[in-house]
Amino acid sequence: MSTTSMHPATSASQNQPADQSQSPALPYARRRDQLVGSVIDASTTVLAQYDHDIVKFGMGAPAPDMLPAADFARIAAQVFSPENFTYGETKGEPVLIDALHEYLTSTDQIPPEQQGNRDRLLITSGGMQGLDLGFKLFVTPGDLVACESPTYTNGSATAMSYEAEILEIPVDEEGMQIDALVDHTRRTGRAPKVIYTVPTFQNPAGVTMSLPRRERLLEFAHRHRSVIIEDNPYGMLRFEGESLPALSDLSPNDPLIFGVRTFSKFVAPGLRVGWIDVDPEVRELAVNAKQTMDSCAPVPNQHLIARWLQEGGADSHVEVLRKAYRERKVAMSEGLARLFPGEVRATDPDGGFFLWVTFEDESINTEDLMTTALEEGVAYIPGPAFSPAGNFSNALRLCFASAAPDRIDDGLQRLRRAVDRYLAE
Ligand code: PMP
C-alpha cells in the first residue's frame, strides 16, 4: 500500500492535523437525513443581515408591546426565588396545573366531561415539545403522517425527525379537505397512523376547519384508529365569527386525540411553557418521554404564569389581544385589497395571527421576491416554507399580529414597491 492512498483517519490517528474536508462521514443515525430543520426560522434569521428598518410580517410572535410586561416584572420579583431555581416535577408544577385547569374550565376550554381531571394535563417546554412528545409516542419509522398543505412545517419536520412518511392534504377555506384524505386512503389502502392538524386559525393559512369537516375527521380517525394531533395555539384568539368546538370538545375523553397547547401566543413565547391535554394513560408515557428530554419545563416561568393566571391577568389580557389583533387583521386585509386589487387572493381569518396571500400571477416566485422585499424593508415567509414538498411558490404568509395598523400599511406599501420592482426586472 503506497503512502498516497493513506486514509485521512490514519493520519489523524498518528496525531497529524486532520484534513476536515477529507474526513470520512460521521457515523450519524439514519434519521440524520430527516432532520430538515425549520425553514420558517431560517427565513427569519436572514433578517439579521440587514441593518435598515424592516417591517416584520414574518415571525409568528406576539408584538412585544402587547405583552403584560409590568405584571410579569412584578410577579417575577416574587417567584424568581431560590426555591424555584431547582428541578421541578416532570409533569409540571402542581400550582400551574391547578391554575391552568381552573382557567381552562372557567373559559369553557375543557369539555364538561373532562372537567376536574387534572391527570390529563402535562406542562411542556412550549408547544413544540408537545408536538415532539406526540410524534415520539405514535410514530414508528416509515409510518404515514398526514398534515395540512400548507402546514406548520415545524410540526411536519418533527414527524420527519421520527422518520415518518409525510402525506400533504390540501387545505381550503374550510380547512383540511377530508375528502382528499378519504380518497387517498381508499386508493392506497393505507390510512395515516397520525393526522397532524391546526384546525383553528391555521398556521399558515389562517383558515378554520368547518364543523362538518371536524365531524368527518373524527369519524375517519375512529374508523382507522388514527391518532389526531390537534395543535391549537391560536384557538382562544378569536376576534370575529361564531366560536367552533375544538376536536377535543366534540369527542371528550377520546384517547385518539392528542391535544397540544401553548402559552406562547397569549402570554409570551420566550417563557417556553405549554401543555398537552391527553388521555391519562398517554400522559403517563409522555411524562417518561419528557424525562429524557429536559426533566421539566422552566420552573420559575411556570410559577410566573401560575401566579398571573391566579390573579386573573389572562382574562383582561386576552380581551386586549383580541381587540388589537382584529384591528390589525382589518388593516392588513384592507391594505391588501387597496394596494393589490385583483392581483392577490388573501384568506380572511376570524382569529389567530396569519393571512395567506396567493398571487394570481403564477410566475411570481415569493422566494425570489424576498430579496427585493427585504431591500425595500419588509419581511414575510415564502409559501414553500409551509410545504414539505416545497409547493406554493406564488404564495406567502403574513403575520398581522406583530405590527400596529399604520406600520402594517407602511409594510404593505413596501411590499407593493418590491413587487413592482420584481415584475419590472
Ligand atoms: N404549533 C403552531 C401551529 C405554531 O404556530 C407554533 C408557534 N409558531 C407552535 C406550534 C409552537 O409553539 P411554541 O412556540 O410554544 O413552541
Image (cartoon, rainbow, N blue to C red):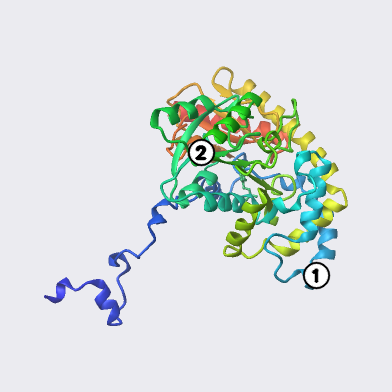
Name the residue at the right extreme.
Answer: 311
Given residues 297 and 349, the one toward you in this image is 297
The answer to whether residue 305 shows anywhere in this view is no
The answer to whether residue 90 is seen in the rendering is: yes
Q: Amino acid at mark 2?
A: Phe
- Which numbered disc, 2 or 1, marks the residue that appears first in the sequence? 1
Query: 105 above or below 211?
Result: below
**What residue sits 30% from the left and 70% below the top?**
19
Q: Position of residue 32 (x, y in %)?
A: 40, 56
Residue identifier under label 2 = 386
Residue 311 position in % (x across, y down): 88, 52
Tell me if label 2 and label 1 are in contact, CB under 8 Å: no
Q: Quarter of the image holding residue 256?
A: top right
Tell me the number on the disc at residue 339.
none
Measure the alpha-carbon separation of dots 2 and 1.
Answer: 41 Å
Quarter of the N terminus within the rendering: bottom left
Q: Residue at image x 45%, y 53%?
A: 35
Q: Would you name the residue on which mark 1 appears?
A: 81
The residue closer to the viewer here, 257 or 106, is: 257
Viewer-nearest residue: 247 or 79 = 247
Under tag 1, what secondary structure?
Answer: loop
Amino acid carrying mark 1 in the image? Ser
**Is 70 positioned to the left or the right of 139 in the image?**
right
* SS at circle 2: helix
Residue 122 is situated, as x and y percent measured from the top left of the image, at 69, 54
Where is residue 281 drawn, in percent x and y? 64, 53
